[in-house]
Image (cartoon, grey):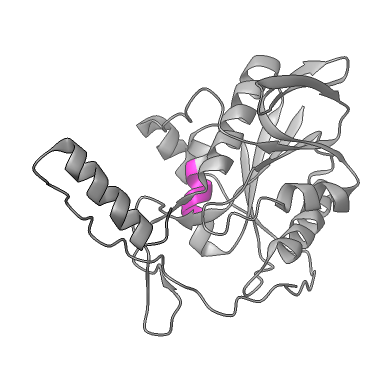
Amino acid sequence: MEILVCVKQVPDADVEVKLNASGAPDIEKIAPVINPFDGYALEMATRYKEANGGTVTVMSIGGDNVKDVMKNCLAVGADEAYTIGDVIADADAMATSEVIAAAVAKLEETRGKKFDIVCCGKESTDFACGVVSQLVSEKLGYGEVIDVIGFEPKDGGLSVKKETEEGYNMVEIGTPCVLGIIKPDYEPRYPTMKSKMAARKKDVPVVETGVSAAPAVKTVKVYEPAKKSAGVKIKEESNEESALKAFAMLVDAKVL
């Protein structure tokens, strides 16, 4: 099957983000990485390809700034990588999905073949909207399964393992389809030196859709999380007295 994985570059979530003088997140010095959920999607797609054949293509909105992430995707299992040249300032989920859907159609036209599966991570770690895959499936007219932790071929379509609050469900869906991927029970692979060298030699073409998508949501102001105040130590003569004092403090603070 032909599998497309939509990838987003995000700031490393392990680094604390501060606001700059203008009140915007200061991310210039934070190393960009592949969005973790997109990394799970790529690993899942690669495992499917290794077991059943096919190709894996990755695609991301951005220019030269995302090519390093694309090269890394090529080093861990992707066969082809493309960037979308239609960069939208302050893009929200609606604008992003419109550009991605147009890029899918353009890429299928360029490659001369359709994608059977379009994989998207559940959400990105920078905005965490969690709706892009649903919007893309609606614009493409494809069926979708979200919260996916695995999928296998079945009767010309897919048997999909979907996580639920009680455990998981097995559902079947025809292709083409969109899958919203969450964390499976394994981690993405690391590139080898050999795969890194091979990835460097591959081209990352640019897809131009010509779509003019305006964001429907505007960020008015960004706030930093409130800093936690230091705790209060309660040390009375006995445990009972400490408990009574703690209870009295909670009553005074109107917590109880």
Q: Residue at (66%, 69%) from the top-left corner?
A: 91
Q: Residue at (68%, 28%) from the top-left corner?
A: 164
Q: Quadrant of residue 251?
A: bottom left
The percent coordinates of residue 241 (x first, y second) are 18, 43
The percent coordinates of residue 42 (x first, y second) are 59, 35
Point out the residue furthest to the left here: 237
Q: Quadrant of residue 218?
A: bottom right
Position of residue 58 in the picture relative to residue 225 (left or right): right
The percent coordinates of residue 5 (x first, y second) are 66, 41
Q: Which residues are magenta?
A: 67-72
The percent coordinates of residue 80 (x first, y second) are 63, 41
Position of residue 247 in the picture relative to residue 146 (left or right): left
Q: Vertical placement of 189 versus 60: above or below?
A: above
Q: Is residue 70 magenta?
A: yes
Q: Vertical placement of 179 versus 31: above or below?
A: above
> Which is the main secondary structure of the residues drawn in magenta?
helix
Residue 78 shows up from this direction: no
Q: Vertical placement of 36 versus 19: above or below?
A: above
Q: Residue at (61%, 28%) from the top-left corner?
A: 44
